[in-house]
Amino acid sequence: MKIMTCKQLGGPCDLALRGDTADDVIKAQDRHLKEAVRSGDSTHQQAHEAMKGRWKNPIKGMQWYRDTKKAFAGLSEA
Ligand SMILES: [Zn+2]
């Protein structure tokens, strides 16, 4: 189990997201962004748009995904 923050994943806050794999924390961040935006938090709007844009722009998205996986791999187990 490792922890990445919303900020490390491109978001604005320090919420800790836990997961056993990079995919888990990315999914958790995706959910967190959606929920924050739905509850009217405009500070997460930009990160949410960026996250949605990654799926529409696979080449740019892939770079982010690789960087995130690398950052995750470099973390120590929590
Ligand atoms: Zn956040």
Image: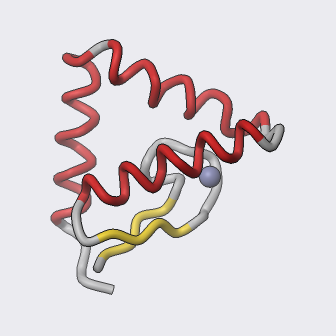
The image position of residue 14, as x and y in percent, is 60, 63
Q: Residue furthest top?
A: 57
Q: Quadrant of residue 37?
A: top right
Q: Is residue 75 above or below residue 10?
A: below
The image position of residue 72, as x and y in percent, is 24, 61
In this rendered view, identify the residue nearer to me: 70 or 26: 26
- Residue at x 56%, y 32% (from the top left corner): 48
- Residue at x 83%, y 38% (from the top left corner): 40
The image position of residue 9, as x and y in percent, is 43, 48
Q: Is residue 4 left or right of residue 63?
A: right
Q: Residue furthest right?
A: 40
Q: Quadrant of residue 74?
A: bottom left
Q: Is residue 61 left or right of residue 44?
A: left
Q: How is the image coloured?
A: secondary structure
- Location of the C terminus (image quadrant): bottom left
Q: Is residue 41 above or below residue 51?
A: below
In this rendered view, identify the residue nearer to me: 75 or 34: 34
Q: Quadrant of residue 73?
A: bottom left
Q: Is residue 5 left or right of residue 58?
A: right
Q: Is residue 18 above or below residue 25?
A: below
Q: How many marks?
A: 0
- Location of the N terminus (image quadrant): bottom left
- Residue at x 25%, y 83% (from the top left corner): 77
In this rendered view, identify the residue nearer to me: 2 or 75: 2
